[in-house]
Image: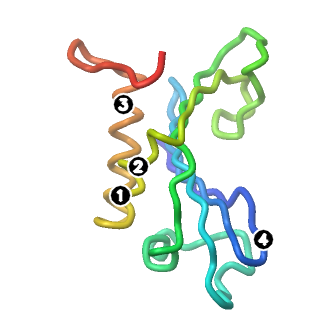
C-alpha cells in the first residue's frame, strides 16, 4: 500500500493537506484544513515533513473530508482522472463527517496512528469481510 502526503492548497494564512493510501483496488484520503499562526517558514515550499504534521498544526486544524476513490472504466458525472490512482478514471465517495476518527488519531496519538486509521478505513471499505459494513454504498 502506498502512502501519499499532498499539500492541495497553500495560501498566506491557511493550508489544505491530504494524507492518502492507495493500492490496486482504490485509494482512501483524509483532508484537513489548517489556519496558520504567524510566520511558519516550513510552509514556504510545498512539502511538510511527515513527523512535523501533528506538532505544527495542533489547535489550528479542522477535519475536512474522508474520501474513497474507486477505479472505473465508466464515464459518469462523478468520475474524473485521479491523481491517487495514476490518472485513471475514478468514482469518488466522501464525507466530512467521516474524517473525525483520523483527525483525532492524528492529533491525540500522532502521525503513525493517523496512518493506521486511514489504512484500517481503506481496508474496511475496499476489502469488507463478513462482519464489516461499508461506510458508503
Query: Which is nearer the N-term, disc 4 or disc 1?
Result: 4
Image mark for residue 135: none
Provide the secondary structure element on which disc 1 rests.
Answer: helix
Question: Which of labels 2 and 3 is toward the front?
Answer: 2
> Can you say which quadrant of the picture contains the N terminus?
top left
Label 4 to label 3, Cα distance in Å?
33 Å
Label 1 to label 2, Cα distance in Å?
6 Å
Q: Position of residue 43 (x, y in %)?
A: 68, 78
Q: Give the quadrant of residue 110.
A: bottom left
Q: Is residue 72 above or below residue 20?
A: above
Q: Residue at x 52, y 47 (%)?
A: 30
Mark 3 neighbour class, 10 Å CA radius: few under 14, some 14 to 19, many 20 or more? some
Q: Which residue is mark 2?
A: 100
Question: Which of labels 4 and 3 is toward the front?
Answer: 4
Query: Which is nearer the N-term, disc 3 or disc 1?
Result: 1
Query: Which is nearer the N-term, disc 2 or disc 3?
Result: 2
Q: Which residue is mark 4?
A: 11
Q: Residue furthest left?
A: 131
Label 4 to label 2, Cα distance in Å?
24 Å
Label 3 to label 1, Cα distance in Å?
19 Å
Q: Is residue 36 above or below residue 84?
A: below
Image mark for residue 104: 1
Label 1 with label 2: CB-CB less than 8 Å: yes
Mark 4 neighbour class, 10 Å CA radius: few under 14, some 14 to 19, many 20 or more? few
Q: Position of residue 9 (x, y in %)?
A: 74, 60
Label 4 to label 1, Cα distance in Å?
24 Å
Q: Is residue 62 left or right of residue 117?
A: right
Label 2 to label 3, Cα distance in Å?
17 Å
Amino acid at each position: 500500500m502506498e502512502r501519499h502526503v499532498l499539500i492541495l492548497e497553500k495560501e498566506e494564512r491557511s493550508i489544505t493537506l491530504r494524507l492518502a493510501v492507495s493500492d490496486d483496488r482504490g485509494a482512501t484520503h483524509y483532508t484537513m484544513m489548517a489556519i496558520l499562526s504567524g510566520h511558519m517558514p516550513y510552509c514556504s515550499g510545498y512539502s511538510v515533513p511527515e513527523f512535523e504534521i501533528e506538532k505544527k498544526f495542533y489547535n489550528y486544524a479542522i477535519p475536512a473530508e474522508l474520501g474513497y476513490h474507486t477505479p472505473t472504466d465508466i464515464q459518469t458525472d462523478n468520475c474524473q482522472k485521479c491523481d491517487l490512482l495514476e490518472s485513471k478514471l475514478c468514482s469518488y465517495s466522501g464525507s466530512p463527517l467521516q474524517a473525525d476518527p483520523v483527525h483525532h488519531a492524528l492529533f491525540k496519538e500522532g502521525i503513525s496512528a493517523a496512518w493506521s486509521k486511514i489504512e484500517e478505513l481503506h481496508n474496511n471499505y475496499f476489502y469488507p469481510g463478513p462482519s464489516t459494513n461499508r461506510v458508503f454504498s
